[in-house]
Amino acid sequence: MPILGIMASSVLKVTNSYESIATTTVSTAVSSITFSSIPATFKHLQIRGIGKPTATGAYDLLFTLNGDTTSNYHSHQLYGTGASAVSASYGTTNQAYITYWDNAQFGSFVCDILDYSNTNKNTTTRALGGHDLNGSGYILLRSGLWMNTSAVSTINLFLGGGNFEQYSQLALYGVKG
């Protein structure tokens, strides 16, 4: 018998595609959070987080891969404030961009690191994040490119200013193929 016009044999099975690798909850302000010894057993990686900087103002949430702090990163973004939308491009930089957080309120994000263990191509990322400031704030969509074909085994996350505030939390997941 059809279910909403779809034959039961054509309904996809839901599987658990995400596996928790590591979670860090900040108990006292820290300058960076590192996920290391990442297994190469997944198709993609996903980082999910909530947090804010300790420093007054708004700052980018950034990351490097495998300790690479050379000019091997490129990023593009589209962001909105509710009143306007803006696009931007960051040429060659020494870190990748995830989102933009303000110390007045906790923000959130989800970042995918695609084909992270494929050594035949450069690594690409995509992130969606932002924060609400009680009627203002940002929402950002960012994409990135790491000009390196090494498999990703370490991710170091940090803010463009200040430290991660207490209760900030970052979690790393492996996405099955």
Image: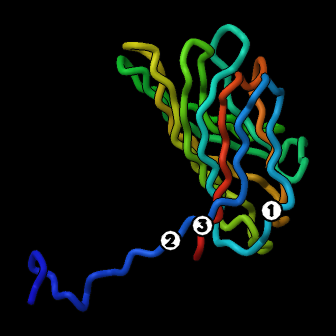
Residue 138, image x, y percentages: 48, 24
Query: Label 1 belongs to which residue?
Result: 38
Spatial distance from mark 1 to mark 2, Cα to Cα? Answer: 19 Å
Seen in the picture, residue 15 relative to 124 is either above or below; the reply is below
Return the disc, 1 or 2, that comes first in the chain's sequence.
2
Badge 3: how crowded within 10 Å, few (<14), some, or many (20+)?
many
- Answer with left or right where residue 86 lies relative to residue 122: left
Evaluate whether residue 92 shows in this view.
no
At x 62% / y 29%, what residue is drawn?
51
Residue 4 image position (x, y, % from top left): 10, 75
Disc 2 marks which residue? 16
Distance between mark 3 and mark 2 Cα atoms? 9 Å
Q: Distance from label 1 to label 3 (Cα)?
A: 12 Å
Q: Please tell me which residue is depicted at 81% across the width and 66% down the height of the picture.
A: 151
Q: What's the residue at 55%, 39% (across, down)?
A: 109
Q: Residues within 10 Å of mark 1 (few under 14, many from 20)?
A: some
Whole-percent x, y for residue 124 in the image? 66, 56
**Viewer-proximal residue, 29 or 123?**
29
Identify the residue under disc 3. Answer: 175
Q: Of the residues under marks 3 and 2, which one precedes in the sequence?
A: 2
Q: Determine if residue 71 is in view.
A: yes
Secondary structure beneath dot 2 equals loop
What is the quadrant of residue 170 in the picture? Answer: top right
Disc 3 or disc 2, which is closer to the eye? 2
Does residue 97 sit above or below 113 in this rendering?
Answer: above
Q: Write the residue at 77% across / 39% down.
A: 157
Task: Say which element carries label 1.
Answer: loop
Q: Amino acid at mark 2?
A: Asn
Please name the amino acid that badge 3 sits on. Val
Q: Is residue 57 above or below residue 117?
A: above
- Residue type at tag 1: Ile
